[in-house]
Image (tube, helix red, strand yellow):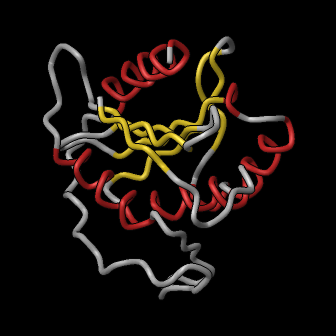
Amino acid sequence: MQRSILVLGAMALVCIAGCRESVPQAEMTSPAPPVGSQDAREGAISYDRADAVRRELQALMERPVSAVAGAPFLIINVNGTDKFVQFAGGAGEDLVLDLPRVVLSDDEFERAERLLADHGVAMSGEAEVPALAANFGSDIDDAVEAVGVILLQVFELDAGVALDFEAM
């Protein structure tokens, strides 16, 4: 948890400095297709909790931004593991993914760099707190798909993996 706070704090500073541009909020979309199917986006990944991830990200993007604390955060925890994915966002802010290097094995890190490049994910962060990050703007669908790639292809988990959501 302490490492999450460090990473989230650093990300908040970056987001406050670089994400002040106002972006229209994404519209809610229809529910994700059944597990293992593809939606209208070519090669799209689907997983059991995609709808819940979409709802949580939408809620994140509707939360007000504090002048003191900065952008609100969402941590998506994988039950029974130390794996997580985190986002910053908020009303009028961009949706920003942060995947700390510390939660990835060397193999997962290599897969993440390779598989998430199409989603704009790249290395960022300070030398002592490196992370893979991407700015999704208001594209919640792309962020939901990136979470699917992380869960199914980077972490190599089952499509029915249990997730917990922690809003900050």
Which residue appears farthest toward the right when viewing the image? 107
Q: Is residue 106 above or below residue 11?
A: below
Q: Is residue 45 above or below residue 54?
A: below
Relative to residue 123, is residue 135 drawn left or right?
Answer: left
- The residue located at (47%, 37%) in the rendering is 86
Relative to residue 18, is residue 107 drawn left or right?
Answer: right
Q: Residue 25 location, x and y as percent?
A: 20, 58
Q: Nearer the viewer, residue 70 or 73?
A: 73
Q: Nearer the viewer, residue 96 or 148?
A: 148
Q: Is residue 103 above or below residue 135?
A: above
- The residue located at (39%, 57%) in the rendering is 53
Q: Residue 158 location, x and y as percent?
A: 67, 62
* Position of the C terminus by quadrant: top left
Q: Is residue 26 above or below residue 166?
A: below
Relative to residue 70, is residue 64 drawn left or right?
Answer: left
- The residue located at (71%, 50%) in the rendering is 155
Q: Residue 51 location, x and y as percent?
A: 37, 67
Q: Residue 84 location, x and y as percent?
A: 56, 38
Number of marks in picture: 0
Which residue appears farthest toward the front when viewing the image? 80
Relative to residue 22, is residue 13 drawn left or right?
Answer: right
